[in-house]
Amino acid sequence: MGRAYQNRKESMAKTSDAKAKVYSRYGREIYVVAKNSGVDPDGNLALRRLIEKAKKDQVPTHVIEKAIDKAKGGGGEDFVTVRFEGFGPGGCMVIIDCLTDNNNRTFGDVRQCFTKTKTKIGAQGAVAHMFDHCAIFEFKYDDEERVLDALMEAEVEVNDIESEAGVITVFTPATEFFKAKTALMEALPGIELDVDEISFLPQNSKELTGDDIPLFEKFIDMLNDCDDVQDIYHNAEIKD
């Protein structure tokens, strides 16, 4: 499981520079979470997690505050979450999460990314069953057994735990995110979570070669240019 996660991180790092609209995407997501579940981070765990994630990604405070202030007004756009699935260049599997106030527009934009790279958008459920929906925590620590004990004591279901070069990575079901995070922070005071996120991890990878590599990069860049696209998950593996 861990190798698949590392592959995704490395692959996404190659295209992360294309996310010129990262601030607006965080702003939109913070607005939606705050509007739907409350503007107080202490009472809205999802909002608190999102704010922490935004700060780690160096989103300016004024962007976060503006989104929350907009949610306090109660009006504004009504966004919904939409997920698309399909097969990208080289037959890799792709999941695309969007926030939209116009589903027809978003579908058209995402479909165009597939069409222009000669790939295929699929029906709902086409590839999701080949991914694990996981909560992931990564932090510097050297006692894997202590970490596992802490999670077991808190009755957290653990999918996998890895320790390498003084860094521990914990994988749990997505539904265990807050429970697992609380257990880790309480049992291991002082640790800093370098990664704490919910993600789709592929159960297997698809190595891309030849012309599929630049086509895949074009595909990801096009998706990143879509205003409504929030997250992209895939099983593509590009070896140097």
Image: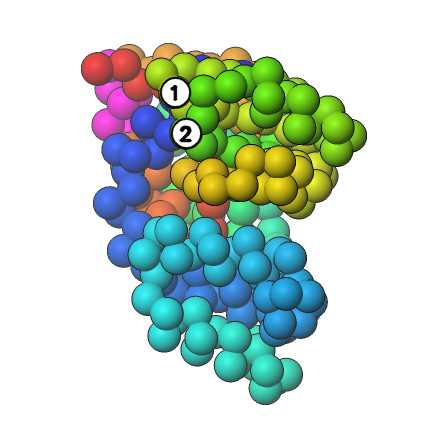
Q: Amino acid at mark 2?
A: Lys
Asked whether disc 2 touches disc 1, contact meaning CB atoms under 8 Å apart, the reply is: yes
Q: Is residue 184 left or right of residue 208?
A: right
Asked if residue 46 is positioned above or below residue 184 in the image, the reply reads: below
Asked if residue 173 is positioned above or below residue 104 in the image, the reply reads: above
Q: Position of residue 147 (x, y in %)?
A: 59, 24
Would you say the magenta stretch is mainly helix, strand or loop?
Answer: helix
Q: For the residue carrying disc 2, how many other residues have a C-alpha within 10 Å: few (<14), some (14-19), or many (20+)?
A: some
Q: Position of residue 135 (x, y in %)?
A: 59, 35
Q: Position of residue 110 (x, y in %)?
A: 46, 47
Q: Which mark is residue 183?
A: none
* Element at label 1: loop
Q: Which residue is at 58% across, 61% downward? A: 47
Q: Which residue is mark 1?
A: 166
Q: Is residue 99 left or right of residue 91?
A: right
Q: Is residue 144 left or right of residue 92?
A: right
Dot 2 or dot 1: first in sequence order is 2
The answer to if 117 sits in the magenta stretch is no
Asked if residue 70 is positioned above or below residue 55 in the image, the reply reads: below
Q: Which mark is residue 140?
A: 2
Q: CA distance from mark 2 to mark 1?
A: 6 Å
Q: Nearer the viewer, residue 215 or 141?
A: 141
Asked if residue 96 is positioned above or below residue 137 in the image, the reply reads: below
Colour basis: rainbow
* Element at label 2: strand
Q: Which residues are magenta?
A: 210-216
The answer, for residue 187, to whether it is visible in the render is yes
The answer, for residue 227, to whether it is visible in the render is no
